[in-house]
Amino acid sequence: MSEPYEPVPGDDCPGCAYPIHTPAQVEQFVRQVAAEGRQLIVHCNGDAAAELWVSTAEAVGAEHPGWLATRPVMIHAQTVRDDQLDRMARLGMIASIFSAHSWFWGDTHMTNFGPVRERRISPARSALDRGVRVTLHQDTPVTPPDMILTLWAAVNRISRSGAPIGLEQRISTWEALRAVTTEAAYQYGEEETKGQLRPGMRADLVVLSGDPLATRPQDLRDIEVIATYKDGEAVFTA
């Protein structure tokens, strides 16, 4: 983090945590990947980590502009700031957001970050409003691979205690569905074959027990997957 976590009893100086890699190491990694023309997907939770990834991508992207076409990704983007999202939009960097954090750990985030930073956990609305493409993920086995819960969390932003977690960062059901279908396919360069239901696309799809767009946001997590198809073949039926 660029600013310390909130103090807790017995620890008046909790610090900002620490990076896994030094800036020099990150720059070396990114420069090597750019030279090979490969996509890079980087795990960033804190805003200091986000700053290191964005600033390095800016520097290396200026040297290898073609590399940005590989669609660099920031995984989690948990506490990314608006100024960083503005720069991500210019880079074409995708924010893959762990939206269920607001449900599983929203109450803990209030303790760790305080009310101002807690409201901005997983800021999908800010990202979309700034032209950043957004996908949603679960980080399994940290949480179960439950995409319906992921959709519900992004649309409702409620903690397990029932507390609202920055309702201004909610996204619509349509935006959440796009994040796990068309945008997910785009993230991996598969938008010509996956992510939409139309002629010519691979028949990778699910059948749901209800229409998400006709369901009240608070009831989205009650929808069930009743069948899954891979390349047109049923691989799961309820």
Image (spheres, rainbow, N blue to C red):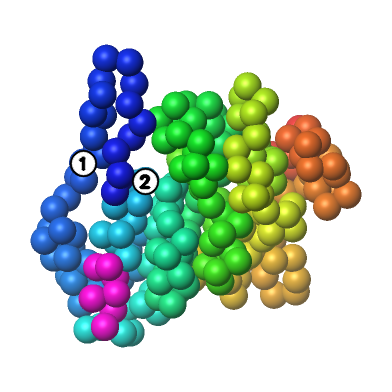
Say if the magenta span includes residue 125.
no
Q: Secondary structure at mark 1?
A: loop
Q: Who is closer to the viewer here, 136 or 80?
A: 80
The chief SS type of the magenta part is helix
| Quarter of the image where the N terminus is located | top left
Residue 24, image x, y percentages: 11, 61
Q: Is residue 77 visible?
A: yes
Q: Determine which residue is flagged by label 2.
A: 45
Please tell me whether residue 135 is drawn above or below residue 32 in the rendered image: above
Amino acid type shown at disc 2: Asn
> Which quadrant of the structure image shows residue 119?
top right
Amino acid type shown at disc 1: Tyr
Q: Determine which residue is flagged by label 1.
A: 18
Horizontally, is 87 left or right of 110 in the view?
A: left
Which range is magenta? Answer: 55-62
Residue 177, image x, y percentages: 69, 55
Which residue is rendered at x = 38% and y = 67% of the image?
72
Q: Who is closer to the viewer here, 191 or 118?
A: 118
Q: Secondary structure at mark 2?
A: loop
Say if the magenta span includes residue 61.
yes
